[in-house]
Image: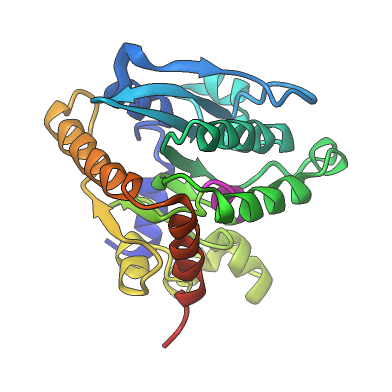
């Protein structure tokens, strides 16, 4: 599979969404929480609290929707600043109660409309990066589809980052990169190879810690395996002091790109 084939697979309308993962892992224990207590409730960001075996977890996901109607309602997973502020509100709440945080990332990028810019899109993303780096509770981010630019990393400053085998993660879309470098978006496949945006590439570069097999709807065996891996990771990190967690997280990102 080429890098651009991975991009197309990550964008597939048949892929499971954040809510599919949340429902499969948390079931009826998940309680959704709404709003940023400032402007609105952004439906592109789903967040709440649920039980993962015996561990209470704050879970946040960028949600694209499953069909055309849902995708329009969810703004195709492109969050507004109030979505990132809602996510940060829930993360700060998790820190207060020392709950681990699980993030699911699937977005082509943050919404770039005039209203979002007027309400501080760049500032909201930058605030998330700064605050997540210092949170004194465990954070795990899982890329389940697209991971586009700042819209993705705003939920990915974590102790560990995992990716599904067909997910992608990049500073820009291959079409956008081709348009800038070659003034020709038809060279997207070539750009995808250059961007090193696949799970395998990013694992080899040390940007992510784990690649997971892509589950399908009803694949309970895979979800049970995933739940076990997540629980073990949280149990390990909950045993570490909050100050040490933040230090290790900071060092993790400082090492990225070093030869």
Residue sitting nearer the eye, 156 or 220: 156
Main SS of the magenta part reads helix
* Residue at image point 11% right, 31% down: 221
Residue extending furthest toward the top:
28
Q: Where does residue 27 sit, x and y in percent of width and height?
A: 30, 16
Any part of residue 112 in sight: yes
Q: In this rendering, would 30 be left or right of 134?
A: left
- Locate the N terminus and report the quarter of the image it occupies: bottom left
Q: Is residue 199 magenta?
A: no
Q: How many marks?
A: 0
The quarter of the displayed image where residue 101 is located: top left
Position in image of residue 63 (x %, y %): 50, 30
Residue 66 lies left or right of residue 52; in this view the side is: right
Q: Whole-percent x and y of residue 213?
A: 21, 47
Q: Residue at x 47, y 41 (%)?
A: 106
The answer to whether 97 is drawn above or below residue 110 in the figure is above
What residue occupies the far right of the structure in this picture?
Answer: 118
For the C terminus, give its image quadrant: bottom left
Looking at this view, is 108 or 127 the one in front? Answer: 127
Q: Quadrant of residue 121?
A: top right
Q: Is residue 151 in the magenta section? A: yes
In the shown orientation, is residue 105 left or right of residue 186?
Answer: left
Identify the residue at image location x=49%, y=63%.
247
- 53 or 35: nearer the viewer: 53
> Can residue 189 be seen in this snapshot?
no
Q: Given the current orientation, which residue lies at the most extreme left position?
A: 221
- Residue displayed at 63% across by 50% down: 131
The residues colored magenta run 150-155
């Amino acid at each position: 599979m080429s890098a651009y084939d991975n991009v197309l697979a990550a964008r597939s309308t048949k892929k499971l969404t954040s809510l599919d993962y949340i429902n499969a892992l948390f079931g009826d224990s998940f309680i959704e929480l709404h709003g940023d207590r400032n402007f609105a409730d952004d439906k592109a960001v789903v967040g709440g609290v649920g039980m993962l075996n015996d561990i209470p977890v704050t879970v946040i996901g960028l949600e694209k929707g499953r069909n055309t109607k849902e995708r329009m309602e969810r703004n195709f997973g492109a969050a507004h600043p109030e979505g990132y502020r809602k996510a940060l509100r829930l993360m700060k709440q998790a820190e207060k109660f020392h709950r681990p945080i699980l993030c699911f990332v699937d977005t082509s990028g943050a919404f770039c409309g005039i209203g979002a810019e007027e309400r501080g899109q760049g500032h909201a993303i930058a605030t998330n990066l700064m605050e997540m780096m210092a949170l004194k509770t465990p954070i795990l981010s899982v890329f389940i589809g697209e991971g586009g630019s700042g819209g993705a990393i705003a939920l990915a400053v974590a102790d560990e980052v995992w990716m599904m085998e067909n997910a992608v993660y990049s500073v820009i879309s291959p079409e956008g990169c081709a348009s800038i470098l070659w003034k020709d978006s038809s060279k997207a496949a070539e750009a995808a190879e250059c961007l090193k945006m696949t799970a395998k590439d990013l694992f080899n570069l040390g940007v992510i810690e784990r690649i997971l097999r892509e589950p399908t709807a009803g694949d309970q065996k895979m979800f049970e395996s995933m739940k076990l891996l997540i629980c073990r990771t949280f149990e390990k990190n909950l045993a570490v002091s909050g100050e040490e967690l933040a230090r290790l997280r900071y060092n993790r990102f400082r090492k990225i790109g070093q030869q």
